[in-house]
Amino acid sequence: MTMGSSDSRNAPAVPFLDLEDQHLAVSATTAGAMAVVISPAGVVLHLRDDKPWIPHPGCWSLFGGAVEQGETPEETVVRELAEELGLTEVEFRPLWRVVDKGGDGRVLTIFEARTLLSPDQMTLNEGQGLEAFDLDEALRQKLAPFCRRVLTRLGTDRSGHGIHAG
């Protein structure tokens, strides 16, 4: 997996998406890392299992998971993309930190992850489904609340440039 920035132990902190996230992060006790996967087909999302004990059941969301002890968010996103999608060749960079206030309350470091693979070349190992959407179409889906905030900001910052269904 390729990375566009240096090891997070020596890098400046990833900014918060907004001031509310910065305030909420003070009381958060766990961390996670999530990736906005962008392929030539668009933004790749997965449909979460419809299990009541998981955060955001039955919602479309980003890929990722909990930061394990001794891991950096970068190491977490590398591991999670390999485990959940079989992705090992990805260009990625950190975007923001958000608090999953509608889920389990953890601080999530959000990465942009670009791949040349289309969804049909990926292996979904977690969730009910995998699909690529253009940004506007993605925002019309039932999304995990943090995912909606991230994709909305991504669209605002870039006007969706380079994020489209093929």
Image (cartoon, rainbow, N blue to C red):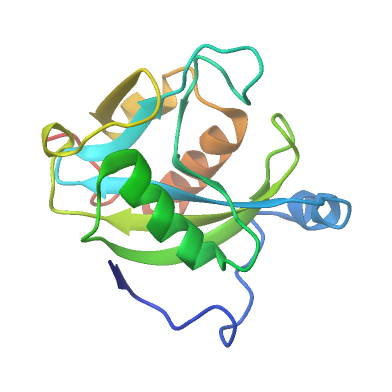
In the depicted view, which residue is nearer to us: 89 or 143?
89
Residue 152 percent across, percent down from the top left: 49, 40
Q: How many numbered marks, from 0 up?
A: 0
Q: Residue at x 27, y 33 (%)?
A: 134
* Position of 4 relative to 165 (above/below): below
As displayed, is residue 110 above or below residue 100? below
Q: Residue at x 25, y 45 (%)?
A: 86
User: Quarter of the image containing the N terminus?
Assistant: bottom left
Instruction: Name the foreground residue: 133 vs 69.
Output: 69
Q: Is residue 142 left or right of residue 128?
A: right
Q: Position of residue 99 (x, y in %)?
A: 71, 46
Percent x, y of residue 42: 23, 39
**Residue at the outermost front position:** 69
Q: Residue at x 44, y 38 (%)?
A: 62
Residue 10 seen in the current view: yes
Left or right of residue 2, residue 72 in this image: right
Q: Which of 150/66 is in front? A: 66
Picture quadrant where residue 16 is located = bottom right
Res 123 quadrant in image = top left
Tell me if residue 160 can be seen: no
Residue 17 in the image: state x and y as whole percent: 63, 55
**Quadrant in the picture for the C terminus:** top left
Image quadrant where residue 72 sits = bottom right
Residue located 70% across and 54% down the image: 18
Q: Residue furthest right?
A: 27
Does 106 appear above or below 10?
Answer: above
- Above or below for 148 versus 7: above
